[in-house]
Amino acid sequence: MIKLIQKKNFLTLLICFTAFIAKAQLGYNFSHYDVGVAAGFNTVYGDELPTATTPSVNFNFTYNQTPFTNFVFEAQLGRMAGGDSLATTGRQFTSSFTSFIFRGQLQFGEFIDYSNSPLMNGVKNLYVSAGIGYAVTHITSISRYPSAIPGFYAGQNNSQQPFLPLRIGYEFKFYNQYELPTFKVDIGYGYNYIFGNNLDGYTYTKSNDAYSQFSIGVKFAIGSEVVSYRKQIKY
């Protein structure tokens, strides 16, 4: 009888201890991996005016070293456009593009104390990001012999150029019943500096091209493995 009581007491303590540990981890755990999709709106800064806004779709895979330090691989597919064949210069183009990007992303929660401040708790999901990218473009229509200014504008119909992606944004985190961030909404603005001058099919000037992108997307945590962070994620 005494041994039976001792066993029951031991099991009770074990269950209580396990429950305490599990409860203590609420708000600290996260998943290493996310997959996501986003809609993008692109503007090219090249050799022609006016600029135009065109759509794209972005697919991404994220490795979360911590909830606030992330490494993102992204593929973008869409269209680019700019210029007006009836404008002063007569330059105009449309193209399709595919970009591949690898970037590191640092959210403010990695280095600020957000435990006792509603303001800092809101600021923690702001992020900055930079990395390396590669853009492949194919011109679908272009005005190289404009009527506004007779002549020829040099350039190539196809290009493959590396670029520097810079991005700022905000990640809204949504939590499940275990306070694990399993669903995220990402809103960001990116500026992509091309190491070349043929993104738009023109090499009229000597300035490198660039394109900006505003995007909004969703991410989903995947995988059964969860790990613990050094501080509580949700407050």
Image (spheres, rainbow, N blue to C red):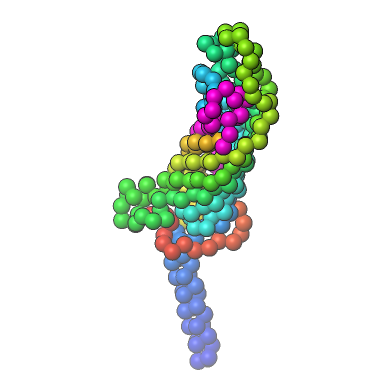
Position above or below: 114 against 152: below
Where on the picture, by quarter, is residue 126?
top left
Q: State left or right for residue 61 relative to residue 110.
A: right
Would you say the magenta stretch is mainly helix, strand or loop? loop
Residue 198 on the magenta span: yes
Q: Position of residue 110 (x, y in %)?
A: 42, 55
Percent x, y for residue 210? 53, 32
Toward the viewer: 177 or 185? 185
- The magenta segment is 195-219
Say if residue 105 shows up in the picture. Answer: yes
Which of 75/32 is in front?
A: 75
* Residue situated furthest bottom in the rendering: 2
Image position, residue 143 (x, y; %): 63, 15
**Residue under the image location 58 percent in, 34 percent down:** 196
Point 52% across, 11% down: residue: 88
Residue 167 vertical position relative to residue 178 in the rendered view, above or below? above
- Residue at 55% x, 51% y is 71
Q: Please tell me which residue is depicted at 50% across the width and 37% down the height of the picture.
A: 190
Up-down relation of residue 79 to residue 113 (above or below): above
